Image (spheres, rainbow, N blue to C red):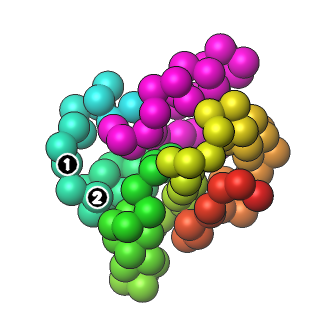
Amino acid sequence: MLRLLSDENLNGDIVRGLMRIHPDLDCVRVQDVGLMNTADELILEWAARENRVLVTYDVSTVPPAAYQRVAESKPMPGVIIVPDQLATSRAIADIAFLSREIQASEIANQVFFLPF
């Protein structure tokens, strides 16, 4: 099962919905670990140390920061980009599926865009 870190800009309804249907999901929010208003590079560094896949709406700055980590041969557990126009229910279903069915090694060093 994937371990997740939700970015501060991710809709809280998505996180709450994930936890409601998947209570054993290992998901923390940047707000819970003291990373509010933190640069993407530092969030990705923390996620790498904790082996957590970052889930975010941020399509503009997170992917370049993630790809930069990969280019520098730094660990990058993966990123899931949720388009902000994607229905909340669909985002919850897709993230829940990925968290249960994808192995950490299958998403490492990748930026995955929903929906799939």
Residue nearest the viewer, comparing 79 with 1:
79
Q: Is residue 88 above or below residue 111?
A: above
Disc 2 is placed on an element classified as: helix
The image quarter containing residue 41 is bottom left
Residue 61, numbered label = none
Residue name at image x 62 percent, y 21 percent: 17
Residue to which mark 1 is pinned: 38
How far from the left and from the top, in percent, is residue 75? 45, 67
Residue nearest the viewer, comparing 102 with 93:
93
Disc 1 is placed on an element classified as: loop
Any part of residue 38 in sight: yes
Q: Provide the residue span drawn in magenta.
A: 1-27
Give the residue type at disc 2.
Answer: Asp
Residue name at image x 31 percent, y 51 percent: 43
Q: Is residue 43 above or below residue 69?
A: above
Give the residue type at disc 1.
Answer: Thr
Q: Residues within 10 Å of mark 2 (few under 14, many from 20)?
A: some
